[in-house]
């Protein structure tokens, strides 16, 4: 079972590019972020014609997540638990049923968190957009713990907006005051990992130089000035099923690309 995560940066703007990649890569499941569309505005037909079941959790103009699956989906839920007043569409999950295993899939678009405000000592203040990011990560940690307690193969995959370590940025020094790389952000990410999750890509590719995002500005793609912020986290039961994991980096060099590229994992399901 080939499962990919892909921040497409607008389903309407990247519609053709997404279909081209799906036709080439043939993932069984694609977890999408930043669809930037309400549910009823999502162009379902081209994906359904390719055999995909489509589940969305949309929002007008920004955010929004979706699942495309050639396999049956069960128990679809929307919204990260823990805050009934959170209206941002950043979380969707479902159980996908394979030939030998069922797998709980959680697709996420973690808040960016910028701009960050600092106190006089240079400590980031936990309010505004950065406070929302850290609060969201606390809720993510709680959901992660519940997934582990279920003891079912599960993964949390998507755009985490987290640069876990210096090797995940071409120029880490440029990110020291950014919400994606602040020590508090990375510590929150490590707390989730340390519950018992496997960060799929780093288990197979520990070397530096692998990125999943290149900004549109300042020739970032041409200079390979990238960062790795799209991650797949696996429960122990899911990690035992992993066969391969890769980044489809060349997609970034095509016409009208997203600033992200797909990351995929092959599971023995």
Image (cartoon, helix red, strand yellow):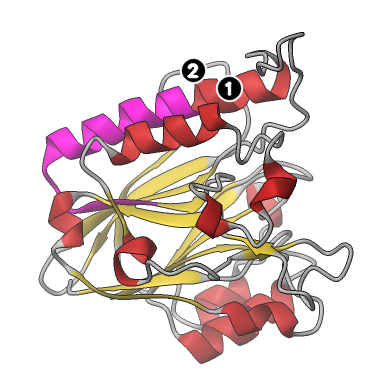
Tell which residue pokes out farthest to the right in this image: 218
Q: Which residue corresponds to the image point at 60% horizontal and 70% vertical from the top-left?
A: 261
- Callout 1 secondary element: loop
Image vertical order of residue 240 relative to residue 66, above or below: below
Q: Quadrant of the N terminus?
A: bottom left
What is the quadrant of residue 47 in the picture?
bottom right
Question: Label 2: few (<14), some or many (≥20) within 10 Å?
Answer: few
Q: Quadrant of the C terminus?
A: bottom left
Residue 119 within the segment the image draws in magenta: no
Most foreground residue, 255 or 180? 180
Write down the region rendered in magenta: 137-156
- Give residue 83's mark: 2
Gap between marks 1 and 2 measured at Cα: 6 Å
* Residue 115, visible in the rendered structure: yes
The residue tagged 1 is 86
Query: Is mark 1 in CB contact (under 8 Å) with mark 2?
Result: yes
Residue 154 within the segment the image draws in magenta: yes
Most foreground residue, 235 or 31? 235
The percent position of residue 36, horizontal first and vertical second, equals 72, 51
Question: Label 1: few (<14), some or many (≥20) within 10 Å?
Answer: few
- Callout 2 secondary element: loop
Q: Which residue corresponds to the image point at 13% horizontal and 54% vertical from the top-left?
A: 237
Left or right, 149 with reference to 107: left
């Amino acid at each position: 079972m080939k499962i990919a995560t892909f921040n497409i940066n607008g389903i309407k703007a990247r519609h053709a590019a997404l279909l081209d990649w799906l036709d080439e890569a043939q993932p069984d499941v694609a977890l999408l972020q930043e669809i930037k569309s309400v549910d009823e505005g999502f162009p379902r037909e081209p994906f359904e014609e390719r055999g995909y079941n489509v589940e969305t959790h949309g929002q007008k103009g920004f955010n929004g997540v979706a699942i495309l699956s050639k396999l049956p989906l069960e128990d679809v839920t929307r919204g990260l638990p823990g805050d009934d007043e959170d209206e941002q569409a950043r979380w969707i999950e479902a159980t996908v049923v394979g030939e030998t295993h069922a797998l709980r899939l959680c697709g996420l678009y973690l808040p960016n968190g910028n701009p960050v405000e600092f106190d006089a000592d240079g400590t980031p203040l936990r309010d505004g957009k950065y406070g929302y990011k850290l609060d969201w990560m606390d809720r993510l940690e709680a959901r992660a713990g519940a997934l582990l307690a279920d003891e079912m193969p599960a993964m949390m995959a998507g755009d985490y907006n987290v640069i876990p370590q210096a090797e995940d940025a071409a120029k880490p020094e440029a990110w020291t005051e950014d919400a994606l790389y602040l020590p508090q952000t990375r510590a929150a990410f490590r707390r989730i990992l340390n519950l018992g999750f496997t960060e799929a890509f780093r288990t197979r590719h520990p070397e530096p130089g692998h990125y999943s995002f290149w900004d549109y500005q300042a020739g970032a793609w041409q200079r390979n000035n990238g960062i790795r912020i799209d991650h797949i986290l696996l429960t122990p039961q899911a990690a035992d099923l992993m066969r391969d994991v890769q980044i489809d980096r060349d997609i970034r060099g095509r016409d009208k690309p997203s600033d992200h590229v797909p990351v995929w994992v092959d599971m023995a399901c």
